[in-house]
Structure formats: C-alpha cells, structure tokens
Amino acid sequence: AQIKNYISKLGLKDYRINFIEKGAIPLFHPLSEKEKNKIDIGTAGGMTRLSTGYTFLNIQEHSKYIRMNIENIQTTKKYNIGKKYQFLDKVFLRVLEKHPEKMPNIFLNMFSASSKTVIKFLSNKSNIFEDISVISKMPKLTFIKALFK
C-alpha cells in the first residue's frame, strides 16, 4: 500500500509491479560451522542487529576487512557485534516480545534522533552520548521493565 501511495504522489500512471518482496528478519543469529575457505556475511555471518534488522554498514565494514586479509582467509576473524550492542538488542527484543503493538511507534521515535546518530547506533559505532540520544527517544517505563526481566 505504501509503495502505491508513493507512486501516486509521483504522478506516475503507467507502471507495472513485477515482484512483491516478503520476508522476515530472524530474531536470532543462525549457528553455522566454519567451513574451509568460506566466510559468512550478512545475517549468516552474525552482522544483523537482532533488534532492528540493520545489517548494511556491518556487511560493508567486514567485507573490507575480508578483502584486506584475503591472503590469510583461514584465520580471518568472525564478525562481532559487541557486548554493548548485544545487551541493548536483548532488552529491545524483550520489549518486542512483550509489546509488539508498541513497535511501530518505538521505531518512529528512534528515528526522530538525528539520522547520523541513529546510523552510528545501528552500525555499532555510537559513543555513550549517541547511545543516550537514541535511548532517550524510547518509552522509558517499558524499557526499564524489560531491563529487569
């Protein structure tokens, strides 16, 4: 429905939709065994933020690392989201589980922070001040309750 509204606003009359994409972002990291000469990227490589599904810059960063270390492909490090972001995602997923009806507004509120700050937060590059900027947009009581569950 949203794409049709967007096309309508553009004033386009003659168009055809060839494909309709559907999907779901897993709320867990798939377990895969390391295979010789194979490096998983994207969701399979643990690069997806479980809370939001954001993966884009994580893939780019790790792909650059792989390219620079391709000679030592056997010993390339596995991508790591980081403990801070794993913790934040865990709390966020608790809220998602208990209050799925609140998620549209929670995402809207999250993106009301500066876009640069949100992208850094989603890309695991934010500092404590940027974390606070994004977290302050969340419903406090809901997240505090999830924090202590």
Image (cartoon, grey):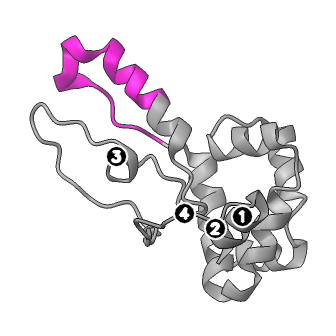
Q: Residue at x 60, y 83 (%)?
A: 97
Magenta region, residue range: 61-80
Tell me how far mark 2 sits from mark 1, CA to CA: 5 Å
Residue 110: percent from the left, percent from the top?
A: 81, 59
Tell me how far mark 3 sits from mark 4, CA to CA: 37 Å
Identity, as a three-letter code, of the amino acid under mark 2: Ile
Q: Is the C-beta separation of discs 2 and 1 under 8 Å?
A: yes
Q: Is the C-beta separation of discs 3 and 4 under 8 Å?
A: no
Q: Specify the label residue 45 is tagged with.
A: 3
Tag 4: Cα neighbours inside 10 Å, few (<14), some, or many (≥20)?
Answer: few
Question: Which element type, helix, strand or loop, lies under badge 4?
Answer: loop
In the rendered structure, which disc, 3 or 4, sits on the residue that comes first in sequence?
4
In the rendered structure, which disc, 1 or 4, sits on the residue that comes first in sequence?
1
Q: Which one is nearer the viewer's eye here, 73 or 147?
A: 73
Identity, as a three-letter code, of the amino acid under mark 4: Tyr
Question: Which element type, helix, strand or loop, lies under badge 2?
Answer: helix
| Residue position for label 4 | 15
| Residue position for label 2 | 3
Q: Residue at x 71, y 41 (%)?
A: 119
Q: Image quadrant for the N terminus?
A: bottom right
